[in-house]
Each structure stands twice: as structure tokens, then as C-alpha cells.
Amino acid sequence: MATFPEGPALSQVDVSLGEASVLPVTGTTAMEPTPTAQRPLKVIRPPTFSLRTIFGGVRTLAQYSDLLYTLSLFRLNVRYKQSVLGWSWAILQPLALMCIYTVIFTRVTTIATGGTPYPVFVFAGLLPWIFFSASISSAVQGLVLHPNLLTKMYFPREIIPLSYLAAGLADFCIASLILLGLIVHYHVALTWNLLYAIPIVLLLGGFATAIALFFSAIQVRFRDVGLAMPFVLQVWMFTVPVVYSLQSVPVRYRKLYLLDPAAGLIDNFRIVVLGGAAPNAASLLTSAAVTIVCLGFAYAYFKSSEATMADVI
């Protein structure tokens, strides 16, 4: 059972005062010793895996929301610090991939897009995927990159991976401007169903959070996770409808295929943004249910592992 001083109290300097002695000067009295201010302590209990762990963790996380906000801004500032192109890098990656895939899948082979021009079709898939994969890739490494924070002070450890996810969401919003420009250029009609994109992106962020929390907790003990994650995400990309449409998947496999929330959410994002239609209710509900279950399990596992992170990192 470990104890850590909480948050900002670490900046205070403790001064231990002994017993006061009488000053050998006539007419003066010794100063009374001032009691040292007691710093709040956080007692990290032995690992547990329960609903109480989840609700207690969420309550504590809400109390540290200002720290999450500060670290998220820090991630954005550090990411583009001393960069000539700065925030343009948030746009260049999906734009470059869009050009590459457009050349491959329009010149070399053909992909069914339902009449939508391929550049805007593939960009609408790349945009949520890059948010999803880049957030996971950086968040999984977050804890091991900050061992001093974990060993010297207490705060909810999930704040570190969550700050990477918040920074990834900011990049997503910036790159969305390019998608809007492509929609205008190719005369794609927009409808009010576009608003469904907000809960879809939030669900995708929730699933990314579940993956990041689970594997970042494992990464503290086994660094193989961080080495394997880029390869896993690279393979994963071709198992979701990013460069191809859901219609390219055989009908008999689609129910199994859509159990992956990333697949269902990216397909629905494309439907509401480019198709102007309401999302597929069945796949959206399936994705939401799987995301909620995974997020609850991953958060409980992360909080149960929190007690020993400072010892093994």
C-alpha cells in the first residue's frame, strides 16, 4: 500500500521544526514553533477489480479535470513545437494518404464507392481512422514516457493517455476542414444527418480510449506492447472499411465483421457525411454496446493496475 502526496501540494517545501529554545537575550521571548501544514495524502489501495473501482475512478478523474485540460494543451504545444509547418501536419498525413490510395485504387484497381468520387470517399474513411489509430499509438506509450510523474506524485494515471486522445481529437477537427473542402469541390450534398457524425466520433473516441487504457496498463509491465502496436494498427486498417466500402465485404460475413466497433463507426461516419442518410441503426447500436462494455472493462483493469504502476515502471 503506497502513499503519494496529491497534486499541487508537491510544490510546497516541508520544514521540520524542533522544540523552541529560549533566546539568551533579555526582554525577548522565543518564537512559538509553527506547525507544519499537513499535506493531503492519497492512499493507493491494493489492486481491485470491481464496479466500485470504476465509479470511484470517474469521481476522482472529474476532480482533476483541470489537469487533464492542461496536459492536453501541453501535448498539442509539444507536438508542433519548433516545427516549420506547425499545425499543417494534422492535415498533411490524411491528405498524402488520400493521394496515394486514389492513384492505387483508381488506376491499378477499382473500388465500388456508390457513385462518390474516390478522393472524398477515401478521405472520409481516413479521417476517423487516423484519429483512432494515432491516438492509440501515442496513448499506449504515454505512461512509460513519464516515469517521474508516476513515481513522485499522485494523480489519476489515466489522465496521461487521455491527454493524448484529446490532442488527437483536436487534430481530427483541424483535418475536417479539408474534408469539408473536398465535399464542396465534388458537390456532395450535405443534410442535417451530418450531425450524427458527432456521436459517431465520440463513440470512436470511446473505443480508442478503451484500447489505449487497456494496453497502456500492460505496456508498463511488458514493453513488447508498444513495439507491436504500430504493426497491429497497420494490419487493423485493412480490416475496416477505410479504403473500400462495406459493400465489398461478403454479406455472410458482415454481422461478424461489424462486431468491430471501428468498422461500424467508420462506415456510419461515411454514410452520414457523404451519403446524407441516417446511420445504420443496427450497426451503430452494436458498435455502441461493444464500446461501452470494452470501455468499462478496460477502465476497471487500468484502475486495478494503477496501484503497482509506480513500482514496476
Image: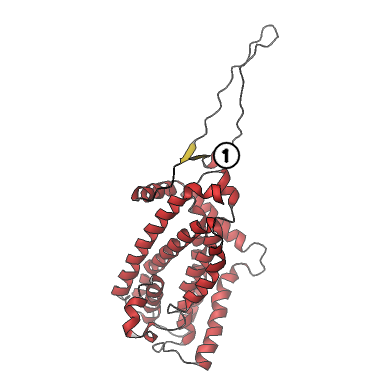
For the question of whether residue 307 can be seen, the reply is: yes
The relative height of residue 83 versus residue 311 in the rendered view (above or below) is: below
Can you name the residue that lies furthest to the right here?
25
Q: Please identify the residue farthest to the left as the structure is shown.
A: 282
> Is 106 left or right of 198, judged from the image as shown?
right
Which residue is tagged 1?
10
- Disc 1 crowd rating (10 Å Cα; few below 14, some 14-19, many 20+) is some
Q: How many marks?
A: 1
Q: As displayed, is residue 92 above or below residue 66?
A: below
| Visible residue check, residue 191 | no
| In the displayed structure image, the side of residue 247 where residue 91 appears, left or right | right
Residue 208, x across and y down, in percent: 45, 65
Q: Looking at the picture, tell me which residue is in the foreground, 76 or 235.
A: 235
Counting from the top left corner in percent of width and height, residue 181 is at 49, 78
**Colour mapping:** secondary structure
Query: Residue sitting at 43 percent across and 64 percent down?
Result: 205
| Amino acid type assigned to the residue bearing label 1 in the image | Leu
Residue sitting at 35 percent across and 75 percent down? 258
Question: Measuring 50% from the left and 76% from the top, which residue is drawn there?
Answer: 235
Decide which of 224, 241 is in the foreground and name it: 224
Tell me: 39 left or right of 15: left
Choose top left, top right, bottom left or bottom right for residue 271: bottom left
| Residue 7 as seen in the image, left or right of residue 47 | right
Which percent across, then down, holds residue 117?
A: 45, 87
Question: Measured from the top left, where is residue 19 in percent x and y?
Answer: 61, 17
Q: Secondary structure at mark 1?
A: helix
The residue nearer to you, when weighing 13 against 138, is 138
Q: Is residue 184 above or below residue 135?
A: below
